[in-house]
Amino acid sequence: MLLLSRLYQYSADKFFRFLKSEFFADSFEPEMAFVLQDKSIDSVPDATITQKSFKIVVETKLSDWFYSDQLMRHLQSFGDEEFKVIMTLAPEPMADDKMKSVAEQITEFNALQKYPVVHINTTFENIANAIQDVIDDRDYEMQDVVDDFLNYCYTDSLIKVSDSWKYMRMQLAGTTFDFNVKENIYYDNVDRGFRPHDYLCLYKNKSIRAVGKVCARITAVETEEGMQYTTEFGELTDERKQKIDRAISNGYEYGYNLKTSTQRYFFVEKFYATDYEKITPRAPMGTRIFDLTQILETEDIPDTGQIADLLSAKTWG
């Protein structure tokens, strides 16, 4: 609910676009309608301001443990709203037999209603994906909010099945690009949340210029006892420690102090050169997640070198 309220506060238009895409038909127009000379039965007022009524009732579980009797009691929460949705939200979709049973009971309930109730079963991951579909590159504040939400969901097992294999995360790498590519490493502040991803790409000068497959993820910070490392994924080797040391030294050249604040270091097998050009105006100011299955139009992700070649023949905006 905090995620949705933040979206509404950020942009009411994008919040309603999210509602329309996930819960209501295209004919649903929940925004305020401002009409001049709106003729009624007996008069023509100078103007009217109206908004269609709707209500969404949410039931959340940590697994598919929804009880139909509880859901049927929730139906009494509705009044005379024109659009009514009961949403069941969990880390995994509801089982088919349970969906069928709930549908039958809601159909029976709707037989006595002027406006029917619609049941939407979804997951925490689907909610995040739907919000990402209505925001864009320059919605920096909301991108950070969604990243934090995803990080929370993964930490608390609200997203159970990782589909990181198909995601590519874009990072800005202007001044450090050459070093990143040479050392096959990228670093970011540990406080920045992120969706798990198998691929990392680097943006510079209106285009994604390099892509690599993540093989390790390690955090590091200097303490009184020396460097402290935490392995999140992959293996902590002497070679990777040396790369972290070189990244810290390289950072000093650009005014970055990577020692005293915990950084997350992403190691890739190899950065392959590509030229995935951004054709819309204005450069992105933050990260972006790409779904490679959509970009490449296949569920079979090729090796990283082929991905780089295929991206060079495409554009994005």
Image (cartoon, grey):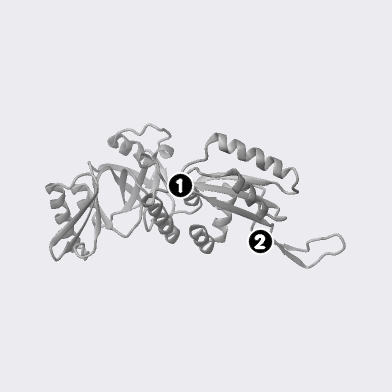
- Residue under the point 17% across and 54% down: 244
- Closer to the chain start, of discs 1 and 2, is 2
Residue 30 in the image: state x and y as whole percent: 65, 56
- Residue under the point 14% across and 52% down: 241
In the displayed structure, 97 sits above or below 169; it is above
Residue 183 in the image: state x and y as whole percent: 18, 48
Nearer-the-camera pick, 214 or 230:
230
Nearer-the-camera pick, 296 or 76:
76
As helix, strand or loop, the secondary structure at mark 2 comes to loop
| Residue type of the residue flagged with mark 1 | Glu
Residue 204: in sight, yes or no?
no
Residue that label 2 marks: 32
Tell me, for residue 125, which label it has, or none.
1
| Residue that lies at the very extreme toward the right in this rendered image | 42
Residue count near mark 2 (Cα–Cα under 10 Å), binned few <14, some 14–19, many ≥20: few
Asked where in the image residue 119 lies, by quadrant, the reply is top right
| Residue type of the residue flagged with mark 2 | Met
Residue 280: in sight, yes or no?
yes
